[in-house]
Image (cartoon, helix red, strand yellow):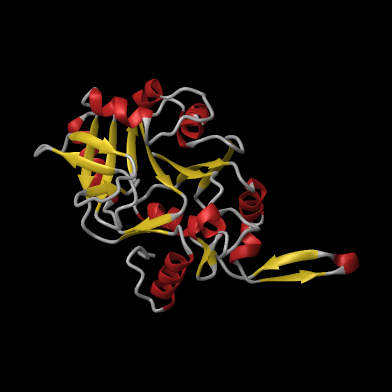
Amino acid sequence: MKIVILCGGYGTRIRDVADDIPKPMIPVGRFPILWHIMKYYACFGHKEFVLCLGYKSQAIKDFFLNYEAHIKDFTINLGGKAGIQFHTDHSESDWRVTLAETGLNAMTGSRVRRIRKYIGDDESFMLTYGDGVGDVDLDKLLAFHNAHGRVLTVTGVRPPGRFGELLNDASGAVTEFNEKPQATGGRISGGFFVCRREIFDYLDDREDLVFEKEPMTKLVKDGQLMMYEHDGFWQPMDTNREYQLLNGLYDSQNAPWVKW
């Protein structure tokens, strides 16, 4: 199953941490948070990725084009006998990563629409953001999605109330979706979506199409949006404080998302 990751935003709220690289490339420990997200999916056997690029996309491309040098120890011979000898190994040798330019100013819905050709004939794919980690049980999430047969599953979490609020009934069907409410006592969208290919029927190529607005509202109206409840760890990296939090967890070896 392909994993689509949104990596194209400007990340304006975290420019005080790094303004020369896109947000998914901001490091947690030695490696970008994007790498942590991909490693987490790979732990569940999902190793085929489609990255939706936009702002400063070259930094992400350079990381993967030079992946061996970023990850491994190596010796480089300079001069007439130039060459590189790699000494260590890594566990990502079976990953397949597609890096897709989805537009500098495109919003999330448009970005997803523009990678449709890379989904091929697959009936479903997973979708998430390139700036947040969690310990969502992806096997249970996928089983939930396959059991209900609706178009879209969103993972509902309970962190700070500045994201889209989700209300659901006893079966898990979403009954209301409020984008960025002023205050919330319910769950919010934590990403970690599972999409049936019919999701593309709800998307068009307008650059200003926000996945979390018109398409999700229409899915709710059609009874095609379900929520998987996650009560464990979930944390985005939108601010310097959240950057420090995630790095503190990782440095102290208390990072709940690290399963490798």
- Taking the spot 49% from the left edge, 55% from the top edge, the residue there is 34
Please tell me whether residue 195 is drawn above or below residue 38 in the rendered image.
above
> Which residue is depicted at the point 43% across and 47% down?
129
For the residue pair 113 and 88, the one nearer the viewer reads as 113
Question: Residue at horizontal 12%, vertical 37%?
Answer: 169
In the rendered structure, the answer to whether residue 101 lies left or right of residue 76 reads left
Locate residue 4, reporting x and y percent: 45, 40
Instruction: Give the quadrant of residue 259.
Output: bottom left
Q: Identify the image quadrant of residue 68.
A: bottom right
Query: Quick check: 246 above or below 2?
Result: below
Residue 131 visible to an observer of this rendering? yes
**x and y percent of residue 235 in the render?**
36, 59
Q: Residue furthest front?
A: 182
Is residue 221 left or right of 14 when viewed as pictured?
left
Taking the spot 16% from the left edge, 39% from the top edge, the residue there is 168
Q: Is residue 201 above or below residue 44?
A: above
The answer, for residue 92, to whether it is visible in the render is no
